[in-house]
Structures are given as structure tokens and as C-alpha cells.
Amino acid sequence: MKKLLVASLLSAATGLQVFAQSEVAVSINGVDPKYTISRHIYGHFSEHLGRCIYDGFWVGDSLNVPKQDRIRMDIVDALKRIQIPNLRWPGGCFADEYHWRDGIGPRMQRPTMVNTNWGGVTEDNSFGTHEFLELCGLLKCEPYISANVGSGTVEEMAKWVEYLNFGGISPMTNLRKQNGRAEPWKVSFWGVGNESWGCGGNMTAERYADEYKRYATYARDYEGTRLKKIACGPSDGNYNWTEVMMKNVGRQMWGLSLHYYTIPTGNWGKKGSATAFDEQEYFNTMKNCLQMEEFVSRHSAIMDRYDINKNVALVVDEWGIWTDVEPGTNPGFLYQQNSLRDALIAGTTLNIFNNHADRVKMANLAQTINVLQALILTQKEKMLLTPTYYVFDLFKVHQDAKLLPVSFTSPGYTSGDKKIPALNMSASKDSTGKVHITLVNIDPENKWKISTSLMGVKFSTVTGQILTSSRLTDINTFDGPPKVKNSNFSGAKKQGDQLVVEIPAQSIVMLELK
Ligand code: AHR
């Protein structure tokens, strides 16, 4: 598995190919960059699921941590440091059972509800519309609300939009004012249902396309806020769903969502452990992760046929690794640890999104705290930043920067007769002229020497940061300092006009050229 240089061709993470080689030649085109990497690619997702909202963002009065109302401020500060651009809420599957009016008004008077999707727990609705928008205000990020199509009504959705966005005189405005908020919030990212082919109503694509148009018609644009309506899209390789939506709905949506989760074993019944895996399982996990390239490319190609000017965004609003839950935890809470493997998945996926910035305008990792591929884990007062968090810290430099196309031929990472690209990368130029390159080497054994020529880019210094650790299974724990975290990288230098980088095995590197 760990031998290099087997000559053959394979589809690669960046749409490139794998050949035999000892040194990797990369070229970056800095001349007239065309597309912007939307900061919203770096979005996050917070569902009423397990300990993401309750006992995550929203904690009990008695918990001894800095709080504003019941919002945990150490978490807010950590997410602000990575410039979280948007937060999706309240689901997920939960969204299609959520009735927003149960989550407004005096908290003691709100009805309880059973979270039938996730663990069957009873929630007190103390975290609702006002609390979510207060959280987004503290995070300085844009809210992305997914509204109920599956078990809700058109009227319920229409009234929610009025409650959120209308500034004039109306029953919903009065209600909002009674509940303590005078000004509209101006929410623009608006999800019309979630996974409507499954937990959101088990519909066919044709049926959903019609339902989308009915709901979307009455989700109005009020003065000062144009809704960016995001339709439920396909999961994985359901290309028929995309075809039908583009044909029947097309420009009536701002975005079409795509969900894809990396399952280590590829088997939903026994997904694999978050922390105990061997190299074979690691290889399979990375192979599954790299399928994102194929899904994004093929869904985009369908969208291109109907929308040549790329007006409709592909919104990958659920992605990440999904493993078995940690032993002893509630299976409905989806609590999993987070290792260096997760970081390599995050870096690889974000590079894929960056390189598809022409079509992918938004994405949301599932999920922010204590659920699936989390950025943050908490244990009572303690909290830790996962390896995945550190990837978002490295990659934040790409937010709203111009994508610089990269071309190279990746060496292969092989397992038996299977081979996947060892390297993936993306590059951008920010508004101050700095160029950033993020490189991921998923090969656990081999380092690579990379010689890069940069067209149209002048630089005199290169600095960098690296995320790596000695084992793929390394994690951060609640006791002691983080083991997997960013540190300074000195393996890149300018040689003539070239940039030469030695990227270590199993690492993620961010370079800044000035
Ligand atoms: O993120 C967990 C769940 O995965 C979401 O609720 C659902 O949309 C998806 O199936």
C-alpha cells in the first residue's frame, strides 16, 4: 500500500490525473482570475440533534462558563476566530417537524416537543427564532434557516418570513415586537424543506418540484431583503433529482442543495469507529471522501445544461464524515470523536469546493458542536477544538478571495490494486494581493517535493502553517493541551521564480505568498 510511483491514470480529487513521478510539478495561474471563492463555502450547520443546540450552544443557567443569556461565549469566540460566515438551523430532518411558533414568546409558556428524529428526547423549545438570531448576531454570521415543508403549511412558512423580515405594520410584526424585537432581522438564506426525498416527506423529484414552487411563491421578498431560496437537492449520485429540479424549477431557486457524507466502511449499518481504524479503513475512507469531486462535477454538469451562466448555486449544505457513535453514548445523538483523519477529509473537501467555486457558492459542515464531524466538543464546562476546527482556521484565508486555477498531476496513494490521488490543493488571491495555497497530502507514509510555477504572481516571501500529527488516529482530548493543532511550517522556499515545497506525509499545509 505504501509504495510509490505506480504508473497509471486515475480520476483525481482536483479533476486531475495520477501518473508515476518523483517530484510533483504544479502550475498556478494568477492571470485574470475569474471566480470568487464565496466565504459561504465555509459555513456550518447546527441542528436540534444530540448536544449541538441544547448542552452545546445553549446551556443551563448553572453551567459555570461565560454566557450571554444561555449562549456559551467560549464557543462563540472560537467560531468567530475562524470567521464563521453562516449557520444553518434548525435542521436537517428536524426542520420538517419544527413549528416555529412553538419557539417564540415567554420561554416558560412555550410547549414542549418530542424530537422524533434524534433520540426521542423532549425539548422545551427554549431555543427558538429569537435565540438563534441572537446567536448569529454574536457570531457575526448570516443565518440560514431551513423551513418546514414536510409537516408544515405554506401559510406557516409565509408567516415565518413575514415575522423575520417585514418592517411595516402587520400581525406578525406586532407579534415580533411583543416578543422584544422591533426591527426585522433580514434573513436571506432560506431553505425550502430538507431531504424531501427522505425524512422531509418521502417525495418524488417531480412532486417536490411542484411543492417547492408552491411554498416558494409565498415566501415573499420584503423591502430590503431578497430571499435566497435554497431547494432540497439530491443526495450523493441521485442525478435524476438534479435533472428534474433544473428542468422544472431552474432559476426559481437561488440554490440547489447536495448532501454527501463520507462513511468509512461505506456501510451505513456499521460505519466504522471514529478513533480505532487501520490503514486499510483509512484508505477506504479517503477514497469515499474523494467521491465528493465526482458528485460535485456531475451535478454541476447537469446544472450547466440548464443554466449556462451559473446563476443557480450548488449548496453542499451537509457534508463530512459520519462514523459509529462513541461507545456508551446515545445512538440518536451522533456524538463522534475527531482525529487527524477528519482533518484530512475537511482539507480535501474544502479544496474540492474551492476548485468548483464557479458553481459551489455555499456549503455547511455537519455539524458544529458535539455532532458528527464537529468543530467543537464539550464536556460540562470543558470544551476542545477538534482537528477539523484547525483546518477551518487554516483555510479561512480563501474566504471571498479569487480562485487561482491549479494544474498538476498527483502521485498515487495505493492500496492493493486501488489507487487514489495522494495530493490535492487549491489557491487564491485575496483583496490585498496575497496569494494563499492550501495543500493536503493524504498519503500516510510519503512526503512529496512540489515545484510550483506561478503565472502572473510576483512574491518575495513565503510563510506557512501546518496541521499534522504522528498517527492518523490522533485526537484532541479534554485533558491537557491539543495534540493535533496548527504550527509554523518552514518547508517552503522561493527558488528563483519557483516555489518549492516539501509536504510531509499525512499533513495539511497553508502557504502565504507576499
Ligand atoms: O446531519 C444529520 C442528518 O443527516 C440530517 O438531519 C439530515 O438532513 C441528514 O440525513
Image: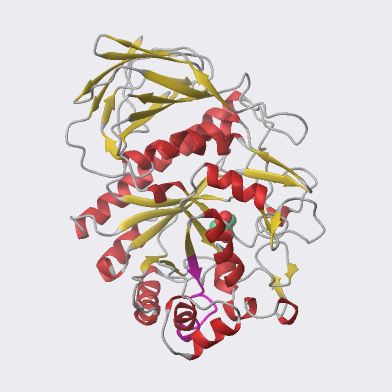
Residue at 51%, 74% (x, y): give it. 148
Q: Foreground: 267 or 54?
A: 54
From the top left corner, tell me how far across and down residue 313 is, in percent: 32, 56
Q: Foreground: 3 or 493?
A: 493
Give the residue at the far right of this rendering. Answer: 62
Residue at 55%, 34% (x, y): give it. 390
From the top left corner, tell me how far across and down residue 78 is, in percent: 60, 44
Q: Is residue 467 visible?
A: yes
Quarter containing the C terminus: top left
Residue 155: within the magenta? yes
What span is colored magenta in the figure?
145-156
From the top left corner, tell me how far across and down residue 173 is, in percent: 49, 85
Quadrant position of ligand 1:
bottom right
From the top left corner, tell me how far across and down residue 288 is, in percent: 48, 38
In the displayed structure, 495 sits above or below 456; it is above
Residue 131: within the magenta? no
In the displayed structure, 490 sits above or below 308; it is above
Residue at 73%, 58% (x, y): give it. 59
Q: Foreground: 179 or 288?
A: 179
Q: Residue 203's image quarter? A: bottom left
In the displayed structure, 278 sits above or below 156; it is above
Q: Residue 327's image quarter? A: top right
- Looking at the rendered structure, the number of numbered marks drawn on it comes to 0
Left or right, residue 44 beside residue 189: right
Q: Foreground: 350 or 456?
A: 456
Residue at 51%, 15% (x, y): give it. 2
Left or right, residue 233 beside residue 49: left
